[in-house]
Image (cartoon, coloured by chain):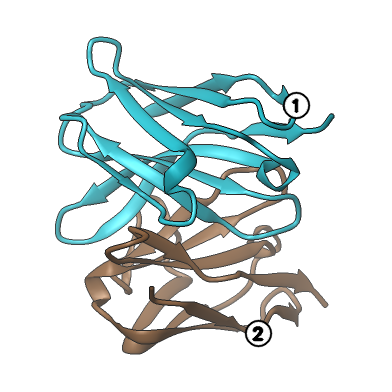
């Protein structure tokens, strides 16, 4: 059974860089897209971007200038960096596995990391 | 960018009743690209339906999805206490790759 375990700093100051990592356990790393999604307090879900095992990325245009998603296939991990954070980046950040076969969906999710940006 | 609009925003029903949740897209969406998720407080979303109508592994058959083009529906035939949650539709597009609806909160009446 595939599990995603995520970690990273939970409290940042404005202008700092958010850094999160997600490890994939119990399944193949190739053949999927590995995504980051965030959810501000009391609000809906926003897709930040994703990466495949080859390192091909896709970013949400609204965040593209500040986002870097990378992959370490030797560790079955992928990471998110979001630069120049502000209070608007305060959210729960999730990693997830994206499937793009006959249907397109996210079937396995991490538990989420709460990130707060405050001076 | 395709925008997904879910209605109603909040739905108040009693256990045993039937729930009908709507997801409308601003442009036509391939059924293969439409998914539904359930989210309970403090938890990550859980996949319910992919391909507009295919139940994910372990999802009870009281959950069903339907629709095509711009109009999609999630139906819960008989509500159980554990079904009260927030439900999101999601579509796969080009940029951004995935977009979500704003959610429907299903609450106990």
The image quadrant where one finds the C terminus of chain B is bottom right
Local crowd size for mark 1, using a 10 Å CA cut-off: few (<14), some (14–19), many (≥20): some
Comparing A40 with A59, the one in front is A59
- According to the picture, the residue beneath numbered tag 2 turns out to be B8
Q: Quadrant of residue A10?
A: top right
Instruction: Tell me the cyan chain.
Output: A
Residue A60: percent from left, percent from top: 41, 53
Residue B53: percent from left, percent from top: 32, 73
Q: Quadrant of residue A25?
A: top left
Comparing A98 with A26, the one in front is A98
Count of numbered labels shown in the rendering? 2
Instruction: Tell me the brown chain.
Output: B
Comparing A2 with A119, the one in front is A119
Side of A91 where A61 appears, left or right? left
CA gap between label 2 and label 1 equals 37 Å
The image quadrant where one finds the N terminus of chain B is bottom left
- According to the picture, the residue beneath numbered tag 1 turns out to be A13
């Amino acid at each position: 059974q595939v599990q995603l375990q995520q970690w990273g700093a939970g409290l940042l100051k404005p202008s700092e860089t958010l850094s999160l990592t997600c490890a994939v356990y119990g399944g193949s790393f190739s053949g999927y897209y590995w995504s980051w999604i965030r959810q501000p307090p009391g609000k809906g879900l926003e897709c930040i971007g994703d990466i495949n095992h080859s390192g091909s990325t896709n970013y949400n245009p609204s965040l593209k200038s500040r986002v870097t998603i990378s992959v370490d296939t030797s560790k079955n991990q992928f990471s998110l960096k979001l630069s120049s954070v502000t209070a608007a980046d305060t959210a729960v950040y999730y990693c997830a596995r994206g499937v793009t076969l006959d249907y397109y969906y996210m079937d396995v999710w991490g538990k989420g990391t709460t990130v707060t940006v405050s001076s | 960018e395709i925008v997904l609009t879910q209605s109603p925003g909040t739905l108040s029903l009693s256990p045993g009743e039937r729930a009908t949740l709507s997801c409308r897209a601003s442009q036509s969406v391939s059924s293969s690209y439409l998914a539904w998720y359930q989210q309970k407080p403090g938890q990550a979303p859980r996949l319910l339906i992919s391909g507009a109508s295919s139940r994910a592994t372990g999802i009870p058959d009281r959950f069903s999805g339907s629709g095509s083009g711009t109009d999609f529906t999630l139906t819960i035939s008989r509500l159980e206490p554990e079904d009260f949650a927030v439900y999101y539709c999601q579509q796969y597009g080009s940029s951004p790759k995935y977009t979500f609806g704003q959610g429907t909160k299903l609450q106990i009446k």
